[in-house]
Image (cartoon, rainbow, N blue to C red):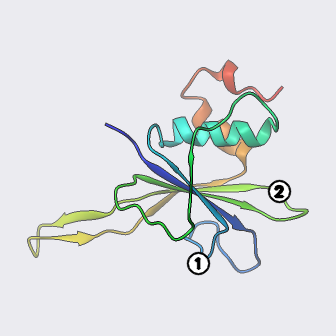
Amino acid sequence: MSTRATIRFATREDGVSFSEHPKKWHAQFYKHHDGYPEGLGLELATSIVRSGSKYGVNMEIERVDVVHSDIEYMYYIWQDHGKSIWISIFEVNGFGYCETCGQDVSTKDECIFVGTPEKLLTKYGSQEDESYYKLN
């Protein structure tokens, strides 16, 4: 089974929270396999921290208006000139079963991470081989 994810690039702006989905983004990529934070999250953070490193991320470029209904994670990479890069990760919940009304209902996405790439490596890298993610 695949763990699918969408990765979006958004501009850091005053008044826009990292823990909410932004209304606009500039580029979008799709990852069909290993989209969970311990996989894709670490790959993204490592790629940012080790600029020009051999740790690339295998993704498909998409139009910014494409919406996948089957993704499990949504990533936002926040950047702007002269500002540090931050990453937000949302667990996309889609639909859940309501025992009260007996129907499938839309559930709210949960923001499970907000921080710098280094913070992501610290949080999720400890669950993997730490020597792979060392910054030096």
Q: In which quarter of the image is residue 24?
A: bottom right
In the image, residue 80 above or below residue 129: below
Image side of residue 94 versus residue 16, left or right:
left
The image quadrant where one finds the C terminus is top right
* Label 1 SS: loop
| CA distance separating discs 1 and 2 | 21 Å
Residue occupying image coordinates x 77% and y 78%: 14
As drawn, the residue found furthest toward the left would be 102
| Dot 1 or dot 2, earlier in sequence | 1
Give the numbered dot on residue 76.
Answer: none
Q: In this view, does 69 lie above or below 22?
A: above
Please report the residue visible at 60 percent of the width from the left and 29 percent of the height from the top: 126
Look at label 2 and name its amino acid: Ser
Residue 47, horizontal then vertical, whole percent: 72, 38
| Residue at image coords 26%, 64% | 95
| Percent of width and height locating residue 32 | 44, 43
Figure label count? 2
Q: What mark, if any, has residue 23 been given in the picture?
A: 1
Name the residue rendered at 48%, 43% in the picture. 35
Residue 50 falls left or right of residue 46:
right
Q: Quadrant of residue 133?
A: top right
Residue identified by numbered label 2: 84
Measured as percent of width and height from the top left, residue 41 is found at 58, 42
Residue 73 % position (x, y): 46, 53
49 horizontally vs 38: left or right:
right
Tell me where residue 83 sits by quadrant: bottom right
